[in-house]
Image (spheres, grey):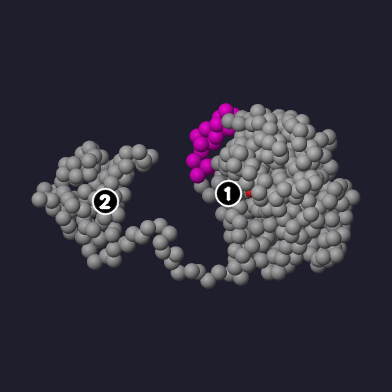
């Protein structure tokens, strides 16, 4: 006849198709039984040989699982007597296991800004991870120089333990801050001290930090309409009031911003390659924006997310490089120049903000992982970064041409915008204007990832169309994708 323990133990299910080791599955099964009170403090476990045969595993596996529970103090072994559930479990309230999602728990009382934000975030943000036509936001991962990266990674993982394992500087690894400042000077015309550079967990964190530093509840932010979804969410989460400002051939319409909210506190713009419309902000618009910020005592966030990849001739100067009054906070990311899972970005603050930012970073943020920063610093200092960017410029230029070459076949239905930087553009529907969502759904069913322009809008705009990303997919996938697009119009 089975003992009580034997009967309970035979309920443990081992799944040999799972990734987890069998001894880990057995350990977790036993742990659950003990924690849920199935076996009580002082009760004896069957011998490991019996346990092994009850559950259908080898004795070594059973010994391994029992050994773990002994070392965790849930079981105790008494020489000559056997293994028992630890006495410390006696009188303990059993942990009740519930199917996940069955108990929503007590709803927390949320802050005002979170309540507002939740209403506005009906649609969850989708961040891509699969290289296919026509995802946006993903660079050409297949062209990344992985061998060099692996060599530098190995070097840093072998280096002094204090250097890679202790707490790093909350502002960013000094070598990386210096490397970023040098790169920005050489390639984006920005002159800054490394102390003005703060390394963050992606541009997204920069937006939250900037919003937290500058915006009080209800303060106004001029926001490009359509505009970047991540930045929009960050400022909304801070309780700011976002003021949609149109984008025309020259970029954000400063006159409209002034008419709607002359008392703005912040303006968010993507001058090198407007997200998502792919326009470049004209020089006169850049100057008008700087002037407006100066007059309103406001600041400008310049999100230069993919400006390194210009391929349409010499780029216009960055806003930061022509900002003489300390109005521009420049934000950059390694998500496009390297790869997004690194979660590394940076902001370059005006000198007047360095003290406040240093206080925020040292008191409330603990910085980002050190060794990826060390690898990136070497990658830049050894010249791999600028080589990679130069190669990628050609790469994206070629893919942009392929998109245009194939778009001719459906030119009567869609006007594809010419871009001069980055790796996405927009296709505007012509005459019949199909419903964006319907078009995107039909494209998805045919294996294409597209986004409607409407997703990027705070308020609807007249022109309808889709955003076409051409960074991540191979040339042949882009060609095939364009053929599929043509069929969607047929
Ligand atoms: C406009 C814009 N800015 C910045 C980023 C990069 O954000 P992160 O550095 O957090 O990956 C993205 C990502 O797609 C973007 O679309």
Query: Exactly how many numbered labels are in the figure?
Result: 2
State the residue position of label 1.
368
Residue at 26%, 49% in the rendered image: 12
Residue 117 screen position, x and y as percent: 62, 64
- The answer to the question of whether label 2 and label 1 lie on touching residues, with beta carbons closer than 8 A, is no
Q: Nearer the viewer, residue 429 or 14?
A: 429
> Around disc 1, counting alpha carbons within 10 Å, would you say few (fewer than 14), some (14 to 19), or many (20 or more)?
many
Mark 1 residue element: loop
User: Majority secondary structure of the magenta segment?
Assistant: helix
Residue at 58%, 69% in the rendered image: 111
- Determine which quarter of the picture holds residue 488: top right
Residue 355 screen position, x and y as percent: 70, 59
Let me know if residue 139 appears in the view: no
State the residue position of label 2.
30
**What stretch of residues is rendered in magenta?**
147-165
Q: Is residue 327 left or right of residue 143?
A: right
Say if the magenta span includes residue 30: no
């Amino acid at each position: 006849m089975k003992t009580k323990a034997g009967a309970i133990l035979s309920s443990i299910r081992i799944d040999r198709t799972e990734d987890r080791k069998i001894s880990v599955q057995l350990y977790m099964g036993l742990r659950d039984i003990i924690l849920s009170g199935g076996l009580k403090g002082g009760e004896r476990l069957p011998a490991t040989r019996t346990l092994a045969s009850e559950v259908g595993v080898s004795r070594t596996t059973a010994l391994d699982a029992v050994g773990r529970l002994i070392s965790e103090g849930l079981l105790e072994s008494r020489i000559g007597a056997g293994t028992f559930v630890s006495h410390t479990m006696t009188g303990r309230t059993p942990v009740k296991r519930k199917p996940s999602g069955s108990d929503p728990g007590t709803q927390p009382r949320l802050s005002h800004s979170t309540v507002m934000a939740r209403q506005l975030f009906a649609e969850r943000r989708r961040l891509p991870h699969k290289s296919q036509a026509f995802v946006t936001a993903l660079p050409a991962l297949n062209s990344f120089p992985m061998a060099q990266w692996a060599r530098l990674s190995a070097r840093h993982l072998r280096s002094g333990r204090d250097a890679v394992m202790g707490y790093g500087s909350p502002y960013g690894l000094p070598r990386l801050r210096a490397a970023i400042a040098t790169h920005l000077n050489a390639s984006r015309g920005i002159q800054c001290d490394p102390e003005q550079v703060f390394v963050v967990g992606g541009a997204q964190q920069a937006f939250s930090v900037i919003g937290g530093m500058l915006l009080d509840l209800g303060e106004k932010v001029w926001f490009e309409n359509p505009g970047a979804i991540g930045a929009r969410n960050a400022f909304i989460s801070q309780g700011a009031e976002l003021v949609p400002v149109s984008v025309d051939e020259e970029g954000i319409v400063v006159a409209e911003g002034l008419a709607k909210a002359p008392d703005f506190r912040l303006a968010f713009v993507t001058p090198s390659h407007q997200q998502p419309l792919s326009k470049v902000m004209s020089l006169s618009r850049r100057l008008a924006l700087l002037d407006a910020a100066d007059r309103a005592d406001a600041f400008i966030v310049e999100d230069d997310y993919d400006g390194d990849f210009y391929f349409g001739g010499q780029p216009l100067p960055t806003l930061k490089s022509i900002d003489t009054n300390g109005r521009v906070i420049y934000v950059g990311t390694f998500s496009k120049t390297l790869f997004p899972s690194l979660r590394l970005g940076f902001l370059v603050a005006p000198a007047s903000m360095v003290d406040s930012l240093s206080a925020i970073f040292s008191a409330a943020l603990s910085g980002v992982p050190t060794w990826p920063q060390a690898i990136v610093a070497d990658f830049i200092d050894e010249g791999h970064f600028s080589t990679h960017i130069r190669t990628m410029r050609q790469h994206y230029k070629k893919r942009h041409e392929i998109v245009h070459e194939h778009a001719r076949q459906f030119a009567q239905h869609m006007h594809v915008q010419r871009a001069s930087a980055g790796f996405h553009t927009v296709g505007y529907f012509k005459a019949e204007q199909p419903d964006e969502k319907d078009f995107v759904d039909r494209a998805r069913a045919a294996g294409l990832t597209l986004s409607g322009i409407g997703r990027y809008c705070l308020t609807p705009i007249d022109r309808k169309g889709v955003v076409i990303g051409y960074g991540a997919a191979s040339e042949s996938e882009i060609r095939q994708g364009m053929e599929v697009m043509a069929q969607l119009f047929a």
